[in-house]
Structure formats: structure tokens, C-alpha cells
Amino acid sequence: MQLVIWTSDFEPMIDSVSIPEGNDVWQRTIGDCAQSKDALSAIRQAEFLDLLSSPDVLFEHAGAALFELPSGHLSDYFVRIGNLQSRSGFFSAIFFWMIEHLRGVKHIMCDTWSISTSAAVVADYLMIYEGSTSGSVPRISWSYSPSYIPTSPLKERQIFDAVHAAQKLGGKALFLSSFYSSGGLERAIVEQLAEYDARDSAVLIAIYSILNTCEYSELVLCSMDKLLESRGLRGKNAEASKEVEVISVSSTSYFPDYRVAKILPFVVQDIKEDADFWARYCGRELFALHRDGSTTSDTRHGIRRHHAYHVDLDRLFADPAYLKSLANRVQDVAPFRNVFVDGSAASLTMQESLRKVAPGLLEGSAVYTVPDWREISGRKDCLQALNLKGARSIFLLPAVLTGQTIGDLKRHLRETSLDAMPNIHVMIGLLRPSDPVVMKNYAVLGARYSGTGELTVVEKVALPNFGRKECAWCREHDTLDAALGRTDIDGVSRDLFEARRDLLQVALVNGLVGSEVFFDSSTDSRLPFYGGSLFIDAMIGKEQQRGELDDIEGLEKSRALMTLVESSLLSEADLCFVVANAIQNWRNRTVRANVGRATVDAATVVSDDKFNEARLRAAIWRSLRPYELTLAVRVSTGFEDLISRVFDPVDTIASHRRLGLEASLAFGRELRVRFGGLYDTAKWGSGGFFWLPVVDPVQ
């Protein structure tokens, strides 16, 4: 029997070339429209299953290892569809079998960079199929999400842009996904489309899936559920054991990370490197956690991005300690004829602070507002002022995180005012990068790197540049939201989770500062804070006080230290910033040591003799990325002891028990791996969230 399959006007067709005599079943199948569609579906399924025979597409280790998927779920397999793009016929296959849903498609967005070539090729094939390859017809455009869509901070903008690009040409947007496994990806797209009332302007197609997604998608090219079942693979329902290895899958490249973790402990230098900064600014209500807004001068796009660690620049630049630092930095600086600001509130506050501490520097100067430094090449007034012979100019940059903004400025100054560069002074109000290279470029090399005559950094400190994806409080919000979707949560837990989730949502406006920073069952209380901490010295600012503490020993020193802490205005946000800074210094040190994947042994951060206060432990756990802590837990000698104390209802040390919810968030994956099958009372939420209202001590 021979069949021929083709398309006509976006419709797949099937017919027989030759059917053996007497085989009237196939003849009836070909003649019946519904049955012919079933036959086409079966042929499509067989073709895509055959592609999966490649050894670098389906990763699994017979239960010896689990994969942590971009969705956060643990699975006993991982499928990387992008590797199929090197196979002969793959592009033709996906285009042919999608064709009936491609009529009117004018933009293609794929869920990951790993299949972006597929999006580009399908766009080209579609133009050829439509006969619209002439230069007068707009090309079918395509794009991809740089990270896992449900957790991407750019999700709303990406989906809106895709739909808008298609609608401008009177067509639809195709959202092409590589693989549906948890249901989160397609739901996120559909929910966002619903907000724009644009579901009718979109087509959702997945290349592979294990789910019944007809509720969300127009087409799944191949269902893998039976193939996986035949191999004994259970996906996110896989059982984990204490010895199992967990391999992280990148949410950007979708490559599994097989690098071996190397344990590198904290050292005193990590903690004390920026101690003077914290001595000046802790207790001044300058820091907030989990807040939307901007700590840079980026006024270009009108986007308020999310910051796990947010510095209030307006308050910082007006602080007496900052004014003192500013005055010291400009003692030997000559006056300026021109002042350039970006127009943000922080840049204007910075300008006023400079006038206050050194009025002669800006006396009689002209002020130019340039919201986007890239626009300076089109501002004749600015160029004329910059290039006036002998005129000194200063650019006020409130903050530098990644170096992108100051990089734009440097590039355009070179293009338009190269001869004036020796007379240009750049002042950075707060240099707070996470990248040690950026810190070195501006704090050490300074003007030599910027190419300007002078460069001044008023204050500097290393801090994580965490957006929504890496923010511990965003992860907490999403975990609670997923857990509340379950039906087996008791009423007390449900009320607690719901109140906490709602608090985290509202906090996006002003951030988290005080006792609400940490998750405790007693919502109106603070986690206890004791002495003996390696981090406390960095938070106590006056040398005289430090000297007095050095003269005291033992418990008396601990009592005196904590009396000082509790009588100060130090907040939980201050503590988290100090801890996050120390851990960022640790990260940067491991980068310099060429350690590809550094981790902290959990025994280090549960030790009673170094980190014996609940509040500090919670701050450390939230400052570490999940893989920086949990992968090393497998060699920890103190993890079970900690968990026993945290979840033991008769433990007399309240500070241990009150860490239960924080421990659940920090160690959810490890708790699941080590103890998930041991206790009937354990309850699990989506993504591995772990809570134990009542549980026997871990043996």
C-alpha cells in the first residue's frame, strides 16, 4: 500500500497511490473525512516519535538522578527539543504538520531560545508557501522568550509585543512551545492573552506534550505519554530517595547542568569587606526587600522592574553620612560649567546634595536634562555645551548596577565629543553591581576605563541584582499561590498561606522592611535574634562601641551586643542586605577562583556555634540561590539535626520551631528528596512546598 500526503490551501490531504485488492478498509478510511484525519494524526505521531530515537533529546538516568525543570518541578527525565533542529527533515515536518493552523499568522514567538531556529525557518517557509517573498510584502517576524515564560519578568511585554506585531499586519501570533510538561507554560500564555482580550488573535502549538492540552492549545504535534510510560518514567511524580542527585536545567538555554558542585565556605573577609558601608547606613530606613521600582537612572522605557534588594536613592543621597562621603570625594574637584542629569528624582536629589556640600562646584552652571543618554547625539544644545573649549562638564548618574547605562553614555560621548572627554567628569552616586568586573572597572580603574577626565564613585557596595525570577519573596509568593490550589490543606494553614501571599502582593509597592520580611506562623511576632553572629559586627557602626564590646567576653559580650542591636533602628531589611552583600562577595570570590558551580555546605549555615539565631538563619537561606545551598546538603552532617529541631513539636527552643515555614521554603526540595516518603502526615504542595502541622521528630 502506498499513500501520498500533501497540503492544499492550508489543508492536509491524504490519498492512495495503490491499495492492494480486497483492502477496502483503507479505501473507506481515505474516503471518510473524519477517519482520514485520524490516519493523518497517527502518521504525524509516528513521525515525531521516530525523531525521539536520537540519544541527545530524551535525558534520563533510570532513577539515579532527577532533573529540576525550569518550572521548579523535579522530574526523572528531561526533553530538550532544540537538539532535534540538527536532524534532517525536522523543520519540514513541523511546518507541514502545523500548516492547517498557520493561515493568517504574521508573527511567531517560541518559548525558548533553544528552538528559535525553528521559529525563523517556519516563518520563511510560510512566506514561501503564501507566495509572499517579494520585497514589498512585510516579512513574517519571529521572537523568543529569553527565559521560562511563567516566571519571566518580561512575560507581559513579550506576549503583548508578539500579538501587537501580528495585529499590525492584520494577522495572528503563533506561540510555538517546545514541550508541555507541567501545564504552567500554556496557562501563563493563555492568561496573559486573556488580559489583552487577544485569545482570538493567537494560535498555541506545542511540538511535544505529555498533557491533554486541548483546553489551551490548537495543536500538539506529538504526545509522549505512552512512550514515557513504556520506559517507566513518571515525570514530576517520580519518587525521590535520599541519595538521588538533582541536575538543574537552565531556564534560559534549557541545557541540563552536569557540572560538579564544589563546596566553598564563607570566610571572614566576605563578611567584613563592606563593613564600613553598613556601619554608615544601617538603621537609616534606606533599604527594602521585594519591591517594584528603580534603583537606577533608567527612565528610558517607563518600566518599573522588580528588585529583591531595593535601595531608596532619594533618602540615601539626603542622608548626613552620605553628604559627608560626598564632601570628602569632591574636596579637590574643580568647578563645572555644565551639569547633565537624567531627570529622575534621584538625579535631582543628587544634584541638590552636591550643591549643599560644595556650592562652588555648580555655581552659575547650566543644567541639561537628558532622560536617555543615547539621545545626547541629537541634542544640539548639549553638544555645543560639551564641546565648548575649556568648559568642564559633570554627568550625575544616581546608580550603576550592570554598567549598561554608563556604557551607553560613554559610547555616545566618544562619537560626539571625543575631544571634550578630558574635561568630562562622571559621578556615580551608588555603585552596587553584582558583577565583580563592573566593580573593578569603575571603582578601581575609574577614569582610565570610562575614558573621561575624571570619575568619582561616592559610595560602593556589592549586592545581588535579583529580579523577579531570583527574588526569594517572589518564589515564596508563587509557592504559596500554587499550594493554595490544592484541596487537602487544613483551614488554619489555608488562612495563614492566603494572608501571607496577599501581604507579599501588596508589598510590591513599598517593599518589606520589618518583621514581615520572614514567614512565621505568629504573624505579629519577630523571629528571635541572639548574639555570637559573624554578621553582627558589620552592623554595629561606631568604633567606640566595637572597642567596648571587644573588652567583654563570653555571655556578657553576647548580652551587650544584642542590647545594642535591639536598641538600634536596625531592621530585618538591614540584616538581609548585610547578609546578601556577604554572600555576593562570596560569589565574586568564587568567580575569581574559576569555580564553575560553587555551593555552601548546609552544615555551615545551620551550625549552632556560628549562626544560632533564627532571624539570621532565615536571612542566609533567603540570600542564597536554591542550587547554591541545596546541592551541597547531601554531604551535610547537620541537616537532619536541624530539621529535627525545626519540626519537633516538643522542642523547648522556640527559635528552632519558629523557623519551620522558612525551612520549608528554603529546603523544600531537600525535604522532599530526603523525607517525602517517610511520613504519612507530610503534605506537599506544587513545586515541592513542604509543611508539617504535626510531625514526629526525624529519626
Image: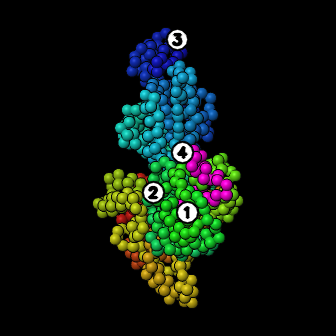
Disc 4 element = loop
Instruction: Tell me the mark number nearer the camera, choosing from 3 and 2.
Output: 2
Q: How is the image coloured?
A: rainbow
Mark 3 lies on residue: 18
Could you give the CA–CA distance between mark 4 and mark 3, rounded to whole angstroms?
Answer: 48 Å
Label 1, label 3: how far apart the Cα atoms are: 93 Å
Residue hosting label 1: 364
Front residue of this view, candidates 103 and 72: 103
Residue 548 on image: x %, y %: 54, 88
Q: Residue at the spot x=61%, y=49% of the render?
A: 383
- Foreground mark, 4 or 1? 1
Residue placed under numbered mark 4 in the picture: 146
Amino acid under label 3?
Answer: Ser
Question: For the residue labelled by badge 2, is the local secondary structure a helix, a strand or a loop?
Answer: loop
First of labels 4, 2 by sequence position: 4
Mark 1 / mark 2, whichever is N-terminal:
2
- In this image, 197 relative to 615: left or right? left
Q: Secondary structure at mark 1?
A: loop
Does the rendering let one see residue 552?
Answer: yes
Report x, y in % for residue 573. 46, 68
The residues bearing labels 4 and 2 have C-alpha atoms spaced at a distance of 22 Å
Which amino acid type is marked by label 2?
Gly
Q: Which residues are magenta?
A: 376-403
